Amino acid sequence: MFTGIVQLTAPITEMTEQPGLRTFGVTLPERLLNDLEIGASIANNGVCLTVTRVRNDTVFFDVMEETLRLTNLSELALGDHVNIERSLTFGKEIGGHLVSGHVHTCAVVSAREETETNCRIRLQVAPQWMKYILHKGFVAVDGCSLTVGTIYDDGFDLHLIPETLAVTNLSERQVGDRINIEIDSQTQTIVDTVERVLAQRQG
């Protein structure tokens, strides 16, 4: 489990390809390497990945074909930066919302407007997911816990403060880029339950 509070962005410094599998190494600072063990979970752009190897300051992850198909990890190249969050430690402050690291879909950046003090990004999402994305609700965007702004039939707005842009790779996202989306699990459960109950009553 994660909180959606990205700790930093880290560069991809190694990458190897095998049939149906990509392994990449991410270089992390010492503070995120403390007590890190093989098998630990780390969110990369909001995708929960298992640590397979640690060599000095480089942490390695295996990404299977299905994950590559569903997320923007398939588009990463050497030198790209990913949003990093180590898994939640209970007893610490939760500043975002509970995030599983299981990406539901990808959104496409359809517009971007930026001033000195804020940035508005409009994301286009497949219509079947919009019933779970509510104005002022939570959504995880490339692993960042963010509040939903204005919603549309095919997407929604995000309003990003300078701190979010400084800490995450959302500062680099431009029109046409794909972004990983994880909807709030509680919202999904409530919407699906209500739909099922109404369908039973009508049937």
Image (cartoon, helix red, strand yellow):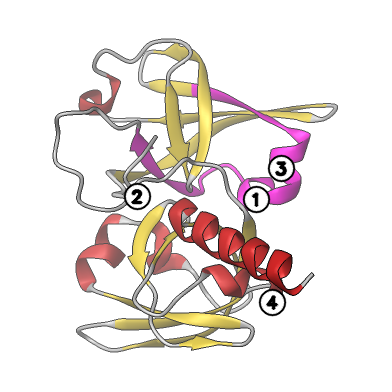
Q: Give yes or no for contact between labels 1 and 3 (Cβ–Cβ under 8 Å).
A: yes
Q: Quadrant of residue 36 in the image?
A: top left
Q: Which residue is mark 3?
A: 68
Q: Which quarter of the figure is the N terminus placed in? A: top left
Residue located at (58% from left, 58% from top): 193
Answer with left or right where residue 34 lies relative to residue 16: left
Answer with left or right where residue 167 lies relative to residue 127: left
Amino acid bearing label 2: Gly
Tell me if residue 14 comes above or below residue 83 in the rendering.
above
Q: Nearer the viewer, mark 1 or mark 2?
A: 2
Q: Which residue is mark 1?
A: 71
Which residues, given as a range, are shown in magenta?
60-86
Q: Earlier in the sequence, mark 2 or mark 3?
A: 2
* Label annotation for residue 182: none
Q: Nearer the viewer, mark 4 or mark 2?
A: 4
Amino acid bearing label 1: Thr
Q: Earlier in the sequence, mark 4 or mark 1?
A: 1
Amino acid bearing label 4: Pro
Nearer-the-camera pick, 184 or 68 = 184
Q: Which residue is mark 4?
A: 127
Nearer-the-camera pick, 80 or 127 = 127
Q: Which residue is mark 2?
A: 4
Counting from the top left corner in percent of width and height, residue 142 is at 48, 55
For marks 1 and 2, give the CA distance.
17 Å
Counting from the top left corner in percent of width and height, residue 128 is at 70, 71
Name the element at disc 3: helix
Q: Is residue 70 visible?
A: yes
Q: Is residue 182 visible?
A: no
Name the element at disc 2: loop
Residue 83 in magenta stretch: yes
